[in-house]
Amino acid sequence: MTSTEQVAGGERIHTRETMDEVVIRFAGDSGDGMQLTGGQFTSTSALLGNDLATFPDYPAEIRAPAGTIPGVSAFQVRIANYDIHTPGDAPDVLVAMNPAALKKSLADLRPNGIIIANTDEFNARNLQKAGYEANPLEDGSLEGYRVHTADITTMTRRALEGSGLDTKSMDRCKNFFALGMVYWIFSRPLETSVDWLREKFASKPTLAEANEKVLHAGYNFCDITQAFQVRYEIAPAALGEGTYRNIMGNSALAIGLVAASHQIGRPLYLGSYPITPASDILHELSGYKRHGVITFQAEDEIAAIAATIGAAYAGHLAVTTTSGPGLALKSEALNLAVMVELPLVVVNVQRGGPSTGLPTKTEQSDLLQALFGRNGDSPVPVIAASSPADAFDTAMEACRIAVESMAPVLLLSDGYIANGSEPWRLPDLKSLPRPRVESPTEPEGFQPYARNEEHLARPWAIPGVPGLEHRVGGLEKDKLTGNVSYDPKNHDEMTRLRAAKVAKIADHIPELEVVGEPSGDLLVLGWGSTLGAITGAVRKAQEKGLKVSRAHLRYLNPFPKNLGEVLGRFDKILIPEMNDGQLAFVIQAKFRREVVSFSKVEGMPFYRDELLQRIEAALEAKSND
């Protein structure tokens, strides 16, 4: 819908257009504050009631080479007036703070998209660093786009004349000039960011005032100059009733762990060694001391999980967090947790590998490590979060399984979930599950490795209770007393009992739900953060009349009991993964069912349209069979 408005006494005319959605990418040098800029736009849009999804993308280096393509930091946000699941395939708007940002993102920008370029940075030196032989703002190569230029750095300095700030400090404010421009274009109020600045820089009011002044300068630049003839509006999304907040995956996971601690009635202990992209969980939980949370930053990954096992032995809800290579270091101690049968949650926020790989990029390539990466027969439950908001529920579920089964649980997230954000409806606290914990207090009849029938779990005997003294350790134990045992038959029985305990979890998890027709030509089976792209692609395919359904796995070990039966209802199974086909490998091995693996290992999430093309190709291949 289009309308015109007359502004300020009839001197300026702007056209207003209503949009259903828009995808905006802020891109600049890693020191340009693009993550902050995108975050502020996201927060403001969330308060306006838009549904949204974000995708931060930044270099691993703390200060990557300035002005180069590897040094580009970007933040993509999609806002809409309806329910969305991904941060979008192609940006509609690209804010390019320098030539490298333009060059890196241009291929993604949709045709006729808007480019807002900071011309001050398009100098000979930066153009050379970005690999341009000529200035793209002048050579006609951007004719397929709507290009808007602004001397953002110059105007920022001009706005701050007399502020007392040096030039370097002034230039750090230029991201708020760009933010002010985008706020004007998309009819966003400034108050949210102004309030944030005043709180953030409460002890440095000069900086708060400077950024606020620049924010208004960017807004007024668009308003006064009529550089943009059109303003856009995106109405609030029709979300269900409730109280919402914008939340990132790592924050949701941390809050889920705190909630689980309350429901289980045991204090939360986190032993962790900082590693990207899991570190934010440690940061977040360190602020929950008022909820009895204890955080311990260990000297390395091994110490972190070893301390966590000790906390579990002492009766705490024990958690350790890590990412890819850190999980490898924890593997021996994870085996100890399997052997002593203590509840423990190991959170692995996956990133691009192997080794240190692509530490700030996303992947799903630790699945086989999670399932099999230990010595001996050492099965552990493995579950995966599928979105930032889902990380809350997945964290609670991991804790439930850990305490009810007395076993270490691996929770898989990834960088896409950890740093992405979306609206999250605050749950009704009365509806949260309250897991059952068996902690004996009477010594009569106590056997430390006697098991309940429901979960095959041993009792959680807390140290300090007279008569419940018992052995723990990595050596094999007698099946009842826990004393060290080298009896071959006992070892055989204990090995099978530990496996049976994990397998029995399938009795206490939901069956796999199929979204769409219960049978048909093609089932798209996913896990983890591919949920959003799969949902969008399958919807598009269904709108085209294709017989496609989808199902998403939260439980990866054990699988839902009906998984084999579900697979049997479809002619073809397509499994998209951000790895080299690890789930496809497991599914084919376990169910002896041929599947179509669609793997992507680029450190980037799937796009909806590339999945849709793969769905269509799979169906075309089927019709030619």
Image (tube, rainbow, N blue to C red):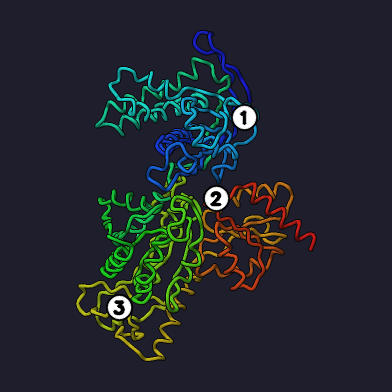
**Lower sequence index among marks 2 and 3:** 3
Of the 4 image quadrants, the one containing the C terminus is: bottom right
Above or below, comparing residue 502 to residue 198 in the picture: below
Category of crowding for the residue at label 2, using alpha-carbon neighbours closer than 10 angstroms: few (below 14), some (14–19), many (at least 20): many
Q: Nearer the viewer, mark 2 or mark 3?
A: 2
Q: Residue at x 59, y 40 (%)?
A: 108
For disc 3, the marked residue is 473
**Lower sequence index among marks 3 and 1:** 1
Judged from the image, the secondary structure of the residue bearing numbered disc 2 is loop
Judged from the image, the secondary structure of the residue bearing numbered disc 3 is loop
Name the amino acid, label 1: Leu
For disc 1, the marked residue is 142
Judged from the image, the secondary structure of the residue bearing numbered disc 1 is loop
**Lower sequence index among marks 2 and 1:** 1
For residue 293, which quarter of the picture? bottom left
For disc 2, the marked residue is 605
